[in-house]
Image: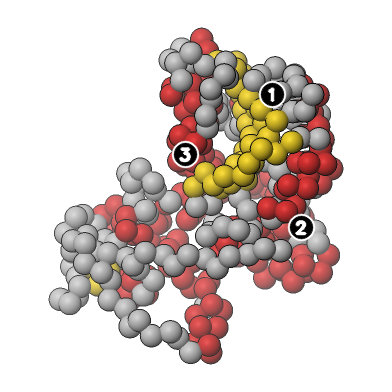
Amino acid sequence: MTTVSPTPAPAPTTAHGAAVPHSGAVPHPGMQLREIVFGAARAAAVRAAARLGVADALGDTPADVRELAALVGTEPAPLRRLLRALSCYGIFAETPDGCFAHTDMSRLLREDDPHSLRHISLWCTEPWTWDVWPRLDDAVRTGRSVFQDVHGKGFFDYLHQDAHESAQVFNRAMTTSSVQSALDVAELLDLTGVSVVADIGGGQGHVLASLLEKHPTLRGTLMDLPGVVARADARLRDEGPLTERARIVAGDCREAIPVQADLYIIKNILEWDDDSTRRTLRNVIRAARPGARVVVIENLVDDTPSMRFTTAMDLLLLLNVGGAKHTRESLVGRISDAGLVIDRIVPVNPYLHAFECVVPD
């Protein structure tokens, strides 16, 4: 497996642009390991700040903790402890006079930030996650999900039947992530010679909507499961501005893809078992004309500066549904085995790669 070292994160800054103080010394290995095994505290602190709305309450100037506590409905002393813990990691910054200010990371917990990670932060720390993480050794031994053993039913059944609040958080997190990455995909793709695009397993259609908005003569199809496309982006349905150029098809891409297009997009859905992945790719080839383009977009667990993030998602997939994120080599193998010809592999953003392919003659 080819790997690269994660690129260092930029130094966090306060609301006034000043760097967050740090010692600069490399921690002793023992201290590094201690920090890692206390990682649950760090994740819980982010969750608490997101649920309390601290980032939304904090404005552009540093605020006294008593003022913040009054705004978010907490006691000042424990709120100071929470913010001090977060500031150690560049999430908020404590000023010399004991106030707290925003950093680049803490702003991402704001609801109104265009790159907000608030809902994703909540999703990754939902109550069920604390139940399955301690069973990771069992998942590694068996190579399968432990969710059924812990909760008595599969992940999605549990989410929608027993954890309605968590399901809402999941939907908001997926929507946030999709909307943000959709703009990156639309910026990346060269649609020269493309009249019709198909977003296969495209969720609510944010990628398709972004492409149709950028290319006024383009037409497109969104395909996903019936319950998913029923909640499609309002721009694509009813009286939305893109309705006349958009078609919505309900179906399972693992069974068939009854869609004709010049370009097929497959984004973040090849995380199932190998058989499902193989059937989806072959269904694209069956549906497409020779020479049609196929773009597979996925997170990778190697050759990427976001390995700490993607490898963590990979383990959570194993725990939840028995799925897996791909290495570059594994995804190249599955795409090639299905019969597609890979032209090039390019980064979409720090955590997504696009595999640009062609359907052979």
Please state if 15 lies on the left or on the right of 127 as rendered.
Answer: left
Q: Position of residue 242 (x, y in %)?
A: 47, 16
Picture disc at residue 145: 2
Of 346 and 200, which appears nearest the observer? 346
- Which amino acid type is shown beneath numbered disc 3? Asp
Tell which circle, 3 or 1, labels the residue nearer the N-terminal end: 3
- Measured along the vertical axis of the image, is residue 96 above or below residue 319? below
Q: Which mark is residue 292?
A: 1
Residue 298 picture quarter: top right
Sequence order check: which comes first, mark 2 or mark 3? 2
Q: Residue at x 50, y 52 (%)?
A: 350
Residue 260 x, y percent position in the rendering = 70, 17
Residue type for callout 1: Ala
Secondary element at tag 2: loop
Instruction: Identify residue for label 3.
Output: 184
In-image side of 342 versus 176 (left or right): right
**Which element is circle 3 on?**
helix
